[in-house]
Image (cartoon, rainbow, N blue to C red):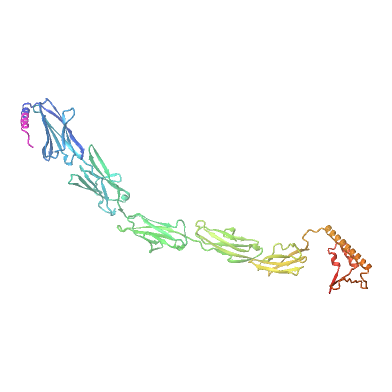
Amino acid sequence: MAFPKNSFILLFVLICSLSLNAWAKVDMTMEESVEVYLGDSAGIPCQYVFSEQPRAFMIQWFVRNHSSRERIYYGDNAQQIVDDGTDFTGRITVSNIGDKEGVLLTIQDVQLTDEREFFCQVNGMAAGNGEGKTHLRVFDPPMAPVIEGVHAGISVTNELPSRIASCEARNGFPRPNITWYRGISPLTPTHGQINVLILVTRESSGFYTVQSKLQYKVAKEDKDVLFSCEVSYYVPGAVRTAESKGINITVHYPTTVVELWKESPQGLVKEGDTVEIRCQGDGNPPPPFTFNRQQEQETALEASDDTLVLREVTRGDSGVYQCRSLDLDTYEEVMGDMQLIVHYLDPALVVPKDSEIMFKGESLTATCNALSSLQTFTVWFKNGQQVGTGHMLFLQDATYDTAGEYVCEVTVPSLPGLHTSGSVHIIVQGAPQMKDADKEVEMEEGAGKWMNLSCEAHAHPLPTISWTVTGSQSWREVLTSATEHSTISLVSIKVTSDITAFCNATNEMGTEAKSFSISAIPMVTSTAPYSPAEGNGVIIVVVIICVLLLAVLGSVLYFLHKKGKIPCGRSGKQEITKENPNKDGIVVEMKTDTKTEEAVLLKGVNGDKNGPNDQVTMNMKAIR
């Protein structure tokens, strides 16, 4: 840029003034640095104080450009000029600072390349001149840090630190810094334990990208630790940080302890169960496992990975089971073991076995035992009802009610799945026995009716029942049945008179009888209640009517005899002939018996129920 001629003249005058007035001076005040975010506006103040008031002065702004300086602004009392062709052309302005002596250089849209030293030069001719500088600092925060761990496992047996993760912070200005953390503790490089490799890249855009790689000698305790990185960067007036997410690394370490346990079933094991045994070591990755029994260490059991399955176990499967692991890095073998107990309950053994015959009045002790690996509990049942507890059952003074099947049920209270049962059949042998056989059964029934009698006898061997009936010929046995311990017979008897019936039960051990006495009640034909007074009155009325009829009939006969209408003969018969000979005649022959009449009267008085017609006979003949 060419300076105007008057500017050279002014400059010459000033130089001469300075040489003549060396004692004049200017006090300059500028900030050491000004900080600003990328893209913002920056203001650089320049304050000055003359020791003598100048007649005229000029202000120039320069910027350091590598090893030289470049003017970007010139101003005096007459003009203010922004130099063309610089990085700041069109982006800077210079203005006064309020009521103070000085100017403010304002830079718009600050760029990364604007981070330089800016010089403010003031020349007051004879009043003196001065210069000051300010360093403009530009800031732009980097992107959030990105961390990435290694995918492969890292062995604790590695002698040197292993690379476990990398961290990257991109596009920051000025250059950001990266710090590594194990949990909440920062990691610093340590010989043989921690190495940090840093790679800084200056992008073409001027930004910095920082990559950091962490090399770490892992231990078993690091398997549950989170590793992270933190980026720190400058901003105007402060330092800020951003932390990455935490990552977990896969640590490989040898097995030192092996545990063996029963996965299923829960609780105690009984015969017939399916048992799952699991094996687990504290190493990573899990080593291969081998199962065997302590009694047969050379025989490997078939298993699936870390699980051994035993199906339908028996007491013979009880014992100590072992699980062995072999570390492929150290070739060290570690073993764990466990005790397996298979509980059992043998079938119940009942004594006496199957069945037992007892005589009436005898006593018997039955026992029920079942061998078990646990404490058992025994209950006796008969016909579904509990009759005793314990492995012994006492039957005393046997009766026929004692007979039957006794079932003992054996259970294991601590293992409900174990149970067994047995039974014994008790037979009570003796002579027949009938209820209330010593008492005669007295009964009443109407004459002519049928009556059923039943008889039940208990005995072993089974008795036979026979009947003896006196007083009736009409009877029959309608039912006979037998159970295991008794015989039942049912007879039907027609009651014609008083009856005595005997039920006889017999077997080879003896006989017992039971008697029935049946009283016959006469049948009454009238359904209405019988009254003697009413009956006698009816009979008297009937007799009187008959007597009157006989008297009238006798009077008529006597009158006809007197008139000669009725001829008499020895036989005492008389014919009556109607006048019409052409029509059929009817001859009526009537006999009267004086004895019969007297009998009728006597019977009527004595209360005979038969009417007078029973004593009168009339013969009628039809004559053509």
Residue 576 location in percent, x, y? 89, 71
* Farthest-out residue, bottom: 624
Q: Residue at x 86, y 61 (%)?
A: 545
Which of the pair 125/572 is nearer the observer? 572
Residue 3: within the magenta? yes
- Quarter of the image where one finds residue 127: top left
Q: Vertical placement of 205 versus 491: above or below?
A: above
Q: Vertical placement of 272 versus 198: above or below?
A: below
Residue 374 horizontal side relative to residue 162, left or right: right
Magenta segment: 1-14
Q: Which residue is drawn at 24% across and 39% down?
A: 239
Residue 90 horizontal side relative to residue 536, left or right: left
- The answer to whether any part of residue 398 appears in the image is no
Residue 563 location in percent, x, y? 93, 67
- Quarter of the image where one finds residue 312: bottom left
Which of the pair 435/377 is nearer the observer? 435
- The answer to whether any part of residue 527 appears in the image is yes
Residue 61: within the magenta? no
Which of the pair 389/129 is nearer the observer? 129
Residue 180 location in percent, x, y? 26, 46
